């Protein structure tokens, strides 16, 4: 199997987005832009992403019963419980709505595309 060369979101990248989000909450656009400067404008095309490692073993098979999505409070509780760490690849994560809000407020520095267009959306 060919190896994938590139970079992946590191803890430092997660900290950068967290710092930008905190600055936006404090209504400090200038500090948010400065926080995003090291990763501003990076897309998957310009900065390829390393494939995440897969958890070993088999994943549980669904029962075939339709379920509804969990509520926002349940999703938040799970993220907090897991300390914002992906259970599949053990990388730190950022909740998608946070990425969307940062992009909405700073679209030039942190572009977003609803269909994750590789040449437009941020690589994060």
Image (cartoon, rainbow, N blue to C red):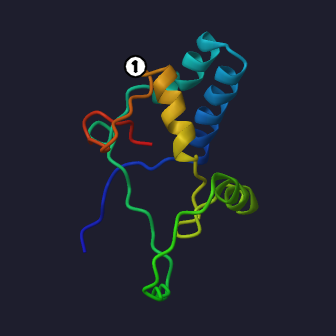
Image vertical order of residue 108 relative to residue 87, above or below: above
Label 1 neighbour load within 10 Å: few <14, some 14-19, many 20+: few
Q: How many marks?
A: 1
Q: Which residue is mark 1?
A: 108
- Please name whichever residue, 103 or 71, is drawn nearer the observer in this view of the structure: 71
**Secondary structure of the residue carrying numbered label 1:** loop
Q: Position of residue 51 (x, y in %)?
A: 38, 61
Occupied quadrant, residue 66: bottom left
Occupied quadrant, residue 44: top left
Q: Residue furthest top?
A: 30
Q: Position of residue 123 (x, y in %)?
A: 39, 41
Residue 117 is left or right of residue 19, and the answer is left
Q: Position of residue 41 (x, y in %)?
A: 38, 27
- Please name whichever residue, 39 or 62, is drawn nearer the observer in this view of the structure: 62
Name the residue at 59% across, 23% down.
Answer: 35
Q: Position of residue 82 (x, y in %)?
A: 70, 63
Residue 111 is left or right of residue 119, and the answer is right
Image vertical order of residue 79 relative to residue 105, above or below: below
Name the residue at 37% across, 32% down.
Answer: 42
Query: Looking at the rendering, in which quadrant would you find the C terminus?
Result: top left
Name the residue at 45% across, 50% down.
Answer: 8
Name the residue at 68% across, 14% down.
Answer: 27
């Amino acid at each position: 199997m060919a190896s994938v060369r590139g970079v992946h979101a590191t803890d430092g990248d997660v900290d950068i987005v967290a710092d930008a989000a905190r600055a936006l909450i404090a209504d400090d656009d200038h500090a948010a832009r400065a926080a995003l400067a090291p990763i501003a404008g990076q897309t998957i095309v310009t900065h390829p992403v390393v494939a995440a490692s897969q958890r070993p073993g088999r994943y549980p098979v669904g029962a075939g019963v339709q379920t509804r999505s969990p509520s926002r409070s349940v999703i938040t509780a799970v993220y907090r419980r897991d300390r914002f760490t992906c259970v599949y690849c053990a990388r730190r994560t950022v909740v998608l709505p946070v990425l969307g809000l940062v992009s909405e407020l700073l679209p030039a520095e942190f572009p977003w595309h609803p269909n994750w267009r590789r040449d437009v959306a941020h690589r994060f």
